[in-house]
Amino acid sequence: MIKGKEAYLKKLTASVNMRSVEVGKELNGSTPPSVFIGSWNYPKVYAGPMIAPQHGDTAIMDAPESWIPGHKTQEDIIRYRLGLVRGKQPIRITDLKNRFVSKLQEISLAQSSTDSEAQFDRKPTGKSFSDEHTPFGPSALIEKFNIGNVKWDRALERVYYDGDLKAAEAVTSLHEKGIPFSNIQKAFSVGTMGTERRRRLVPTRWSITACDSTIGKNLLKEVRQFDMIDCCRVHEFSSLNNYYSVLLIPTAWQYEWMEAFLHILGREELVFSDFEHNAGKKGYSTVGGCYYSCKMAVLEALAREQKQAGAIILREAYPGYVPMGVFNVRENVRNAMNQPPKEFEDMTNALSYISTKLQLPMTRFVKESTLLKELRTCRQTTLSSFLA
């Protein structure tokens, strides 16, 4: 399913006609701070900073947590991202004493934007879109790179200097302290966490899923200890050409993610899904990193409320939607969970309500679902009307 979904999303990104920023071989500007670690040719990867050709505070260009609350449009976000120039050098993932890598670590630990100067081997060109990471603009091999004075975030600094702290513990500790997910992920990707001998560069797309799944796993341990909710709830949210509906049911933890892409390229109506029972999931999800981003966002809200529930999430993407990375899922679901829920006595009534908000018939989601077929009853009410 991953290959089929990836191929489809690549077709979507090919239709984006927004232009990247144009710069020459020399660039004097500011990094938000932002870095990118590629996965091609692993364990020798292309790593480097992303720099905006402007000075001052450029944090908004790499701050996914602020975009939806700040009412940024899809065009705003793409414009921010295509305004970042990616410099890169081939680096072995264990070569953390490399001076270039040290500068990337300085950037990732910074508490604010950093003045940067770069010289490339040629004029940077191109742009990159992905369903895993946020887009970015032109790129080129970087020959020289200098940064101004950097003041580190104190919480990230403490983790960096603690060579006995395991990476998973560092990630969860920072999340509990309220450090933005994107800051944690960037610092994790450049090898600033973990016991000293195990530190290494982690490709950006892998580090995003690693942080989502690590935080989610820790939250699930906590959520399992709480009492279950006492009715069915629906949280919902719409933004960036997407609609999200989070159905919480009064059961022990179980989880299903379903996403539909509707009439974006033509008349297609594609649904992708994956699930886990209470015992958890084995192996990597068939739908990719969005599975872990959504799971983390739901568990985060349940832990905050000190409640346990089963969760079934329905997403629809509409014409105009462009893949911009799994932040889209994480932050939309977070915003959904922050909305006051609608409460229902049983799952049939909850699904009936959700069906009025969907463009795709609920029967199609049920057909693609595993948990909805298994959960025939909720408070003694059957789902026969949706399973017919």
Image (cartoon, grey):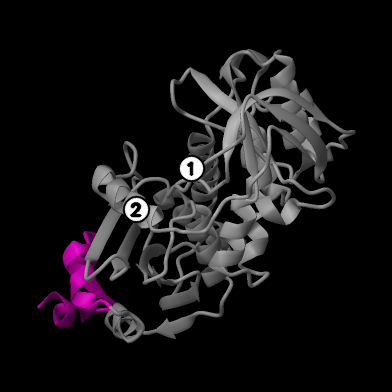
| Position in image of residue 13 (x %, y %) | 40, 54
Pick the front one: 174 or 120: 120
Q: Is residue 208 visible?
A: yes
Q: Is residue 44 above or below residue 321?
A: above
- Tag 1 secondary structure: helix
The amino acid pointed to by label 1 is Ser
Q: Is residue 224 visible?
A: no
Q: Earlier in the sequence, mark 2 or mark 1?
A: 2
In the picture of the structure, the residue carrying the numbered disc 2 is 9
Quadrant in which residue 345 is drawn: bottom left
Residue 386 lies in the magenta-colored region: yes
Q: Nearer the viewer, mark 2 or mark 1?
A: 2
Q: Is residue 136 above or below residue 260?
A: above
In the picture of the structure, the residue carrying the numbered disc 1 is 213
Q: Residues within 10 Å of mark 1 (few under 14, many from 20)?
A: many
| Position in image of residue 213 (x %, y %) | 48, 42
Quadrant in which residue 157 is drawn: top right
Q: Is residue 160 above or below residue 13?
A: above
